[in-house]
Amino acid sequence: VMEDLFKKATSIVLSKCPQDVELFHKYVSPAQKGRLEQMLKNKFITISYTEAVDILKRAPQTFIFQPKWGSNLQTEHEKYLVKHCGEVPVFVVNYPYDLKPFYMRDNEDGPQHTVAAVDLLVPGIGELCGGSLREERLHFLQPRLEVWRNLWLITSSSGGTV
């Protein structure tokens, strides 16, 4: 759905707003129009968060933020992943449980413990958008809600009460 939405919106902008695209091309990013046209032609790539971290760890370049499993991907990581995958958009899926909000669906995948979340990385930008499945299973959701409820109570009380 994300790929289709991106391609449809991009196609409409390129065909219905040529003056705006040319203005952007001239003053902001001369390469962007060609990038967009190229993205429309290619199938997007999907990799898991774990695969992304492995790719980053094997990268010949040095990053300001060293990639490690369980840490957020930084813009430098996102741009490298897109470059590594041939300058086509990349979906990164199945993020660590601890990096995402409580309402994201648990993948029940053992010791790595990931959730059904996705980020779309695009050339020249990095993360463009993201999404997730929502947890609908009450036996997973209730314990998480308790933690968030307690955290809210502690946070709201830290400034004192009236």
Image: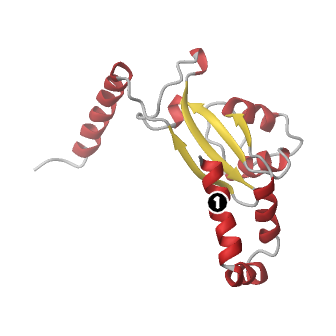
Residue at 33% x, 34% y: name it. 148
Q: Is residue 29 left or right of residue 147?
A: right
In this figure, which colouring scheme has been used for the structure?
A: secondary structure
Q: Relative to 70, is 73 above or below? A: below
Residue at 66% x, 79% y: name it. 17
| Residue placed most toward the observer, 39 or 111 | 39
Counting from the top left corner in percent of width and height, residue 159 is at 24, 49
Q: Relative to 42, is 8 above or below? A: below
Residue at 82% x, 52% y: name it. 87
Q: Is residue 44 left or right of residue 141?
A: right
| Residue placed most toward the observer, 157 or 120 | 120
Counting from the top left corner in percent of width and height, residue 91 is at 68, 42
| Corner quadrant of residue 107 | top right
- Toward the right, the furthest residue is 60
Q: Relative to 25, is 94 above or below? A: above
Q: Which residue, given by chain and number where applicable, does mark 1 sit on?
A: 8
Residue 67 seen from this side = no
Q: How many marks?
A: 1
- Toward the left, the furthest residue is 162
Amino acid bearing label 1:
Lys
| Corner quadrant of residue 142 | top left
